[in-house]
């Protein structure tokens, strides 16, 4: 999970990052409507992790058991780096009503 996290985080230098988790069965081509693909047997539970910053893309295939560890590590990373965010000042409704009178 730390390898996944380091790959995703260090692969991008921008501040904005989108990521997607999707079930992956090992199939790369679509199944035709009539019949089944011969010789295709789905692999056990795997997930496809896609991350992009708008320019650069990363795709990783992981075992389902590793996804939870990745999400926990990713959330810890986000929480650790949120302290530098600017807080917006909220103006109360009472001040606006007094200013208009």
Image: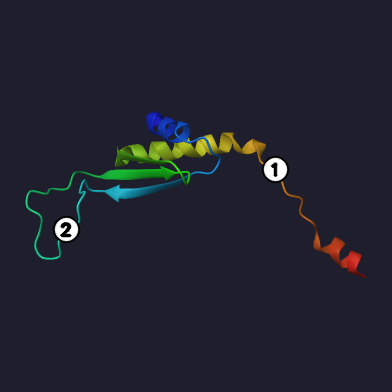
Residue 69 position within the rendered picture, expressed as x and y whole percent measured from the top left = 40, 36
Q: Position of residue 45 (x, y in %)?
A: 25, 45
Task: Kindly indicate the quadrant of the structure image that contains residue 78.
Answer: top right
Q: Quadrant of residue 94?
A: bottom right
Q: How is the image coloured?
A: rainbow
Q: Nearer the viewer, residue 94 or 96?
A: 96
Tell me where residue 98 appears, x and y as whole percent: 90, 65
Q: Residue furthest bottom?
A: 101
The quarter in which the N terminus is drawn is top left
Judged from the image, the secondary structure of the residue bearing numbered disc 2 is loop
Front residue (pair 63, 59): 59
Give the mark nearer the N terminus: 1 vs 2. Answer: 2
Toward the left, the furthest residue is 38
Labels 1 and 2 touching (C-beta < 8 A): no
In the image, what residue occupies the spot 79% across and 57% down?
91
Residue at screen point 42% across, 43% down: 51
Residues packed near mark 2 inside 10 Å, few (<14), some (14 to 19) or many (20 plus): few
Q: Which mark is residue 31?
A: 2
Farthest residue in the front direction? 55
**Left or right of 67: which side holds 82?**
right
* Front tag of 1 and 2: 2
- Which residue is painted at 30% across and 38% down in the image? 62
Q: Quadrant of the C terminus?
A: bottom right
Task: Provide the residue designation for mark 1.
Answer: 86
């Amino acid at each position: 999970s730390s390898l996944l996290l380091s790959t995703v985080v260090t692969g991008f230098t921008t501040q904005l990052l989108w990521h997607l988790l999707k079930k992956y069965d090992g199939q790369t081509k679509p199944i035709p409507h009539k019949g089944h693909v011969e010789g295709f047997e789905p692999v056990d539970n795997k997930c496809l992790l896609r991350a992009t910053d708008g320019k650069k893309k990363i795709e990783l295939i992981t075992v389902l058991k590793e996804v939870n560890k990745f999400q926990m590590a990713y959330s810890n990373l986000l929480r650790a780096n949120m302290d530098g965010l600017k807080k917006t000042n909220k103006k109360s409704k009472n001040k606006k009503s007094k200013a208009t009178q």
